[in-house]
Image (tube, rainbow, N blue to C red):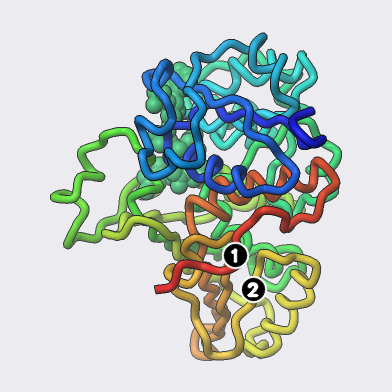
Amino acid sequence: MGKEGRVSVGIVGASGYGGVQLVRLLMDHPEVELVYLGGDSSAGKSFADIYPHLAHRVAQPIESVDSEAIAARCEVVFLSLPNGFACDLAPQLIDKGCKVLDLSADYRFSDLETYQIWYGKQRQDIAVATKAVYGLPELYRDRIAESQLIGCPGCYPTASLLALAPLLKQGLIVPETAIVDAKSGTSGGGRQAKTGLLLAEADNSFAAYGVARHRHTPEIEQVCSDLAGHQVLVQFTPHLVPMVRGILATVYATLRDPGLVREDLITIYRAFYRNCPWVTICDSGIYPQTKWACGSNLCYIGIETDPRTGRVIVLSAIDNLIKGQAGQAIQCLNLMMGWDESLGLPKLGFYP
Ligand SMILES: NC(=O)C1=CN([C@@H]2O[C@H](COP(=O)(O)OP(=O)(O)OC[C@H]3O[C@@H](n4cnc5c(N)ncnc54)[C@H](OP(=O)(O)O)[C@@H]3O)[C@@H](O)[C@H]2O)C=CC1
Ligand SMILES: CC(=O)N[C@@H](CCC(=O)OP(=O)(O)O)C(=O)O
């Protein structure tokens, strides 16, 4: 336990974009105390050396990663590391009794063979991986609450799946017709230097990448298949937009009943998400912008139908670093601890 009965929490990968969002949100979370920050190349520095704007609130040093030391101090550990690292560290922390929330892809797949094919890393931690729960609270709230290990969703899958879930769960579309066309800001690529994320490369430009082979495709398909009750393939195309934060996913699918109009679907979506404080269904004729969600944990969903084609078009906007990453992980923590799902999470965006 931390001070005043608060839960002691650590972050491994504190220097990255996910890490700094976790620090910002957890500093103001009423039930937790941040007791450990860990990293690799940043170890030995102070957090304020990397993020001077937080120097007045966060005095901790960034420490090297030692599972014994982390488990001795932390009840809960967030792993905000590149893919392929959590699967080495999480089993040690789980074994020592910590609750673990992994922001990478390592624990998102119920089928490790799929992970190995798409991520190219062989896994030894099969027993631990089978305990992991996919951290999308709107679909798996009860299982998250019971779990010791959460595989937090990717940013594109979060936006895409929240748009698709009511349609698939209620059999309203032909699942195989689903197409996800998604656009992300550059912070989705993390803080590491990458040529494609340089201002001179990304600014004044707009391009697709990973066409027909992005690693979020099997993640989206895994949950779509679960919802549909049979294997579903999804066409997913991500794009990089010259902005910092935000994802807009535009989802197209053929309605089984082309007579459905947007007002019918809005009613269905509102019923589906009635107990979900972080999903907002827009009024008829309103389509969300990424700017609305920036800085908040909200997912905004707008719905349209096209009677000429018989398709539904669903638009889903999130902040990739909050609902798409750190905020959603904290939403999962709240459920794991039996707290209000909304505790410590920002309800209003930065607009404009
Ligand atoms: N950015 C986004 O929108 C989203 C990202 N994700 C996922 O979340 C995870 C974190 O992403 P993000 O914050 O963007 O990434 P960043 O590249 O910004 O940060 C990566 C962090 O990992 C640390 N790190 C790297 N290698 C090691 C190591 N061997 N031991 C300890 N720490 C290490 C780095 O520490 P140091 O600086 O000390 O080397 C750094 O703090 C990734 O798996 C990403 O795919 C998920 C959803 C959305
Ligand atoms: C713009 C950008 O580069 N976005 C990242 C997605 C970030 C994310 O959610 O990645 P993980 O599944 O690895 O956690 C990408 O396409 O690789």
**Can residue 16 be spotted in the picture?**
yes
Amino acid type for the residue under numbered disc 2 = Thr
- In the picture as drawn, the residue positioned furthest to the left comes out as 200
Q: Which residue is mark 2?
A: 280
- In the picture as drawn, the residue positioned furthest to the front comes out as 56
What residue do we see at 57% from left, 80% from top?
303
Q: Determine the secondary structure under disc 2.
A: strand
- Whether 134 is drawn above or below 311: the answer is above
Could you say where residue 41 lies in the image, as x and y percent from the top left?
Answer: 37, 19
In the picture, residue 90 is in which quadrant? top right
**Can residue 215 be spotted in the picture?**
no
Could you say where residue 310 lies in the image, as x and y percent from the top left?
Answer: 56, 83
Q: Which residue is mark 1?
A: 298
Q: Determine the secondary structure under disc 1.
A: loop
Amino acid type for the residue under numbered disc 1 = Leu
What residue do we see at 42% from left, 70% from top?
291
Residue 134 tag number: none
Instruction: Quadrant for the C terminus, please.
Output: bottom left
Query: Badge 1, how many Cα within 10 Å: few under 14, some, many 20+?
Result: many
Could you say where residue 129 lies in the image, as x and y percent from the top left?
Answer: 70, 25
What residue do we see at 74% from left, 65% from top?
276
Q: Are marks 2 and 1 in contact (CB under 8 Å)?
A: yes
Question: Nearest the camera: 58 or 297?
Answer: 58
- Whether 189 is drawn above or below 11: the answer is below
What residue do we see at 41% from left, 16% from top?
44
Query: In the image, is the residue at mark 2 within 8 Å of ligand 1 by its beta carbon?
Result: no
- Whether 3 is drawn above or below 272: the answer is above
Q: Earlier in the sequence, mark 2 or mark 1?
A: 2
